[in-house]
């Protein structure tokens, strides 16, 4: 893709986490960027503050004579702007196509998987950036270290790209290296089942021109890949994992080196596993042990990934993006490991009717470990409701003795009651709207 041939780019769905990173990328190169999204959010406000024009109403006139129109599969086919762009044969590309062309411009590490890919992408990008590598990174979340989902360097030598499996879009990438974090079933509106998911992830891993790393729990052909794990045998593994004062310490061994006494800047045993593969790739690319130790200790994580907002003796508040049963199990297990004797209350917003339907029993099992469960209504995203698929249906399957479906305002009130020692918010929908109000309420009550 020749950036010199582009004067203006228009994004339909510019407020998405992946789309906004691309918008920032083009804006960085002084290409006129504008776009549409249906709702104003903190992210779209930030884009506007960076000089990007964002519209909140559909209007064909917004496209003007754009050289490129970018959209995602999440945009409804009846969207007025998309229909206009296709009808009049604008240069239209899906986000995945554009990212695929960018991935061919520099040696790329593509990080895919059902869970963990955002953290690994961000962690690896931070390790490289903090060690003075000239790196570009497209991240599916907002880095706490850089307050952005995009990292750019002048004259980049390498780039890290989060590879999205939705709509099989990651198969358009052209990576030198691939990382696969997990192959749990998800997006069953796209994939026909377990075998289809595993075969497609196998195709993704095989895209690597040089080398690939695969979680040893992934069920694909790993003969040509290096494996990684925090338990059992693997080519790259973490050992001597321990928790001291809420921090995780461990050693890492790869086929070529071993690094001792690493402290991770974020919490969670699952993040130790994420750090294992990020470290292995970093060392493969020429990073040193001392750079690795400094980088992992200074890694501040990603917004809404095990993000601790309040930490008082009476009350701890942690927010996480977990929206799949496997993610919930990993997140809640780490919270219990860190605070084994504390009461834990979880506020969860199910994401998508189809995902709730497909994994209702798994969700119930995962949430039943909580002392108290508060469910918000299902967040529909791109979907229409399904008969019988409700938060009340899920609630009835949860075994916790204290459980309730609540409104957002009621959830905020419950989060500040004295009986709740640890408060968790979990989900990928608009539950993020109550994060700041909960934080403010807890700070006001316990911060003096």
Image: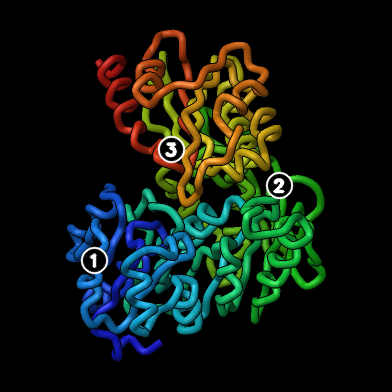
Q: Identify which residue is drawn at 33% across, 80% down.
A: 68
**Residue under numbered circle 1:** 59
Give me the C-alpha separation between circle 2 and circle 1.
51 Å
Note whether 216 is above or below 386 in the view shown: below
Secondary structure at badge 2 equals loop
**Residue 5 image offset from top left, x and y in percent:** 30, 90
72 with respect to 226 (left or right): left
**Residue 202 image offset from top left, x and y in percent:** 73, 68
Note whether 17 is above or below 443 in the view shown: below
Task: Name the mark on residue 230.
Answer: 2
| Residue 20 visible in the shown view | no
Give me the C-alpha separation between circle 3 and circle 2.
22 Å
User: Which quadrant would the N terminus be assigned to in this image?
Assistant: bottom left
Residues marked 3 and 2 touching at CB (< 8 Å): no
Give me the C-alpha separation between circle 3 and circle 1.
38 Å
| Lower position in the chain sequence, tag 2 or tag 1 | 1
Of marks 2 and 1, the one in the foreground: 1
* Residue 190 found in image quarter: bottom right
Residues marked 3 and 1 touching at CB (< 8 Å): no
Task: Name the mark on residue 433.
Answer: none
> For this rendering, which residue is in front, 86 or 379?
86
> For this rendering, which residue is in front, 400 or 232?
400
**Residue 221 image offset from top left, x and y in percent:** 81, 66
Note whether 230 is above or below 6 in the view shown: above
Circle 2 Cα neighbour tier, 10 Å, few/some/many (<14 / 14–19 / ≥20): many
Of marks 3 and 2, the one in the foreground: 3
Task: Name the mark on residue 307.
Answer: 3
Q: Identify which residue is drawn at 68% across, 70% down.
A: 205
Of marks 3 and 1, the one in the foreground: 1
Circle 1 Cα neighbour tier, 10 Å, few/some/many (<14 / 14–19 / ≥20): few
| Lower position in the chain sequence, tag 3 or tag 2 | 2
Secondary structure at badge 3 equals strand
């Amino acid at each position: 893709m020749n950036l010199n041939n582009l004067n203006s780019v228009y994004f339909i769905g510019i407020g998405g986490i992946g789309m906004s990173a691309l918008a920032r990328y083009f804006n960085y190169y002084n290409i006129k960027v504008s776009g549409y999204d249906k709702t104003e959010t903190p992210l779209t406000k930030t884009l506007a503050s960076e000089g990007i024009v964002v519209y909140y109403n559909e209007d064909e006139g917004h496209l003007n004579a754009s050289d490129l129109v970018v959209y995602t599969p999440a945009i409804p086919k009846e969207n007025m702007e998309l229909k206009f762009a296709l009808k009049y044969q604008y240069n239209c590309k899906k986000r995945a196509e554009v990212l695929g062309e960018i991935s061919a411009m520099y040696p790329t590490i593509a990080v895919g998987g059902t869970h963990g890919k955002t953290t690994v992408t961000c962690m690896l990008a931070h390790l490289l950036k903090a060690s003075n590598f000239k790196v570009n990174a497209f991240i599916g979340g907002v880095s706490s270290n850089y307050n952005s989902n995009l990292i750019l360097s002048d004259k980049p030598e390498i780039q890290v790209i989060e590879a999205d499996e939705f709509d099989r879009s990651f198969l358009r990438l052209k990576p030198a290296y691939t990382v696969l974090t997990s192959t749990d079933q998800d997006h069953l509106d796209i994939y026909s089942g377990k075998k289809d998911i595993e075969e497609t992830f196998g195709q993704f891993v095989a895209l690597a021109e040089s080398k690939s790393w695969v979680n040893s729990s992934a069920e694909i052909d790993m003969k040509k890949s290096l494996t990684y794990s925090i338990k059992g045998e693997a080519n790259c593994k973490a050992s001597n994992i321990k928790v001291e004062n809420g921090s995780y310490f461990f050693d890492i061994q790869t086929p070529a080196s071993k690094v001792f006494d690493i402290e991770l800047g974020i919490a969670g045993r699952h993040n130790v596993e994420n750090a294992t593969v990020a470290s292995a790739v970093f060392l493969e690319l020429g990073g040193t042990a001392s750079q690795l130790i400094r980088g992992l200790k200074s890694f501040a994580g990603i917004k809404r990934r095990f993000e601790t907002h309040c930490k008082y003796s009476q009350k701890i508040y942690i927010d996480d993006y977990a929206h799949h049963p496997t993610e919930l199990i990993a997140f809640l297990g780490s919270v219990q490991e860190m605070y084994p004797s504390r009461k834990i209350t979880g506020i969860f917003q199910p994401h998508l009717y189809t995902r709730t339907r497909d994994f209702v029993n798994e969700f119930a099992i995962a949430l039943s470990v909580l002392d108290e469960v508060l469910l918000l209504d299902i967040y529909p995203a791109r979907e229409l409701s399904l008969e019988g698929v409700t938060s009340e249906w899920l609630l009835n399957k949860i075994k916790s003795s204290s459980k309730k479906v609540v409104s957002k305002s009621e959830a905020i009130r419950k989060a500040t009651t004295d009986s709740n020692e640890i408060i968790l918010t979990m989900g990928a929908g608009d539950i993020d709207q109550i994060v700041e109000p909960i934080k403010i309420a807890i700070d006001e009550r316990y911060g003096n």
